């Protein structure tokens, strides 16, 4: 099972949009588990579910099995472990290895080809638990100055946590989202990201598309739409690029 972490410490960066479309696109050919660790539950909503008050992804910190939280979604091959709306991460600041333990004990690698994890925009035990199992990290970023700063902070957080865990850092790449090539700030910010981290670490941008916002109301990721939608085309291209990158790991 390949585990892909969608993460950025900065909010409003398109994490959930990326998580639901990546998971849904992969589920067309593979068995996929989507874990929603963000208590806002946007990824849960995006695949036809919602936040819950029990039997959630966060319930593993109460001693439950992760599989107890599994729920079907709008995609046959996509399973959801939904978010717990009022989980207080600060009560569990010292917990580590919990998710890794559940993966091993429940032998999830025998049931899923991919696991996508949507994290909250925080630096906490949830991120640490996610990094312990991650093969790859995708950092969605809106191309403006604070977005560029946030990418640098995220890279440092990943490497610092990997060092503390005593493991090799996962493959980490950047996905520009809400990108408009006609906006000078977007072009300049993307150039700065390329100069700082290298073109090989950057996926093709996801352009602006109102359908990407509407998909949460419709509870249907754009990649599942039969219409030719820009957001769908962009996320399908991103998925192909990501799979190619993972072949080299």
Image (cartoon, grey):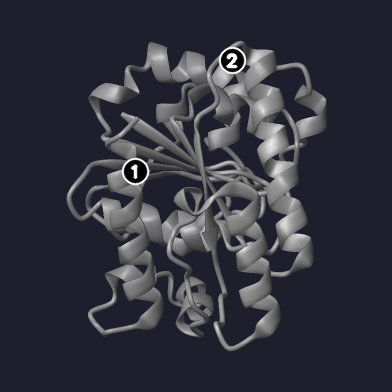
**Vertical relation: 21 (above or below) 67:** below
Expressed as whole percent of the image width and height from the top left, the position of residue 66 reads 46, 27
The structure residue drawn at horizontal position 29% and vertical position 46%, both measured from the top left corner, is 243
Q: Nearer the viewer's eye, disc 2 or disc 1?
A: 1
Expressed as whole percent of the image width and height from the top left, the position of residue 180 reads 56, 82
Q: Quadrant of residue 87?
A: top right
Numbered badge on residue 97 = 2
Check disc 1: other Cα within 10 Å, few if <14, some if 14-19, many if 20+: some
The residue furthest right is 90
Task: Say whether marks 2 and 1 touch (CB < 8 Å).
Answer: no
Helix or strand or loop: what does disc 1 sit on? helix
The structure residue drawn at horizontal position 72% and vertical position 35%, both measured from the top left corner, is 156
Relative to residue 87, is residue 139 drawn left or right?
left
Depth check: 16 or 161 in front?
Answer: 161
Relative to residue 102, is residue 119 drawn left or right?
right
Check disc 2: other Cα within 10 Å, few if <14, some if 14-19, many if 20+: some
The structure residue drawn at horizontal position 77% and vertical position 16%, both measured from the top left corner, is 94
Name the residue beneath numbered marker 1: 245
């Amino acid at each position: 099972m390949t585990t892909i972490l969608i993460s950025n410490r900065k909010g409003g960066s398109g994490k959930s949009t990326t998580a639901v479309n990546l998971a849904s696109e992969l589920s067309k050919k593979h068995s996929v588990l989507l874990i929603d660790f963000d208590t806002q539950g946007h990824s849960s909503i995006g695949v036809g579910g919602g936040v819950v008050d029990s039997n959630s992804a966060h319930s593993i910190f109460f001693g439950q099995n992760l599989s107890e939280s599994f729920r079907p979604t709008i995609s046959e091959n996509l399973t959801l472990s939904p978010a717990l709306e009022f989980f207080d991460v600060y009560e569990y600041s010292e917990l580590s290895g919990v998710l890794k333990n559940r993966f091993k004990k429940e032998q999830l690698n025998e049931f899923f080809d991919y696991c996508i994890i949507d994290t909250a925009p925080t630096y906490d035990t949830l991120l640490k638990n996610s990094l312990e199992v991650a093969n790859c990290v995708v950092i969605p970023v809106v191309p403006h100055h604070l977005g560029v700063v946030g990418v640098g902070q995220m890279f440092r957080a990943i490497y610092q946590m990997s060092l503390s865990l005593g493991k090799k850092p996962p493959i980490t790449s950047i996905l520009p989202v809400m990108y408009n090539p006609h906006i000078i700030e977007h072009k300049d910010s993307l150039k700065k990201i390329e100069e700082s981290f290298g073109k090989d670490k950057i996926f093709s941008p996801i352009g602006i598309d109102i359908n990407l916002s509407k998909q949460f109301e419709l509870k249907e990721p754009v990649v599942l739409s039969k219409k030719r939608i820009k957001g769908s085309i962009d996320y399908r291209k991103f998925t192909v690029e990501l799979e190619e990158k993972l072949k080299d790991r």
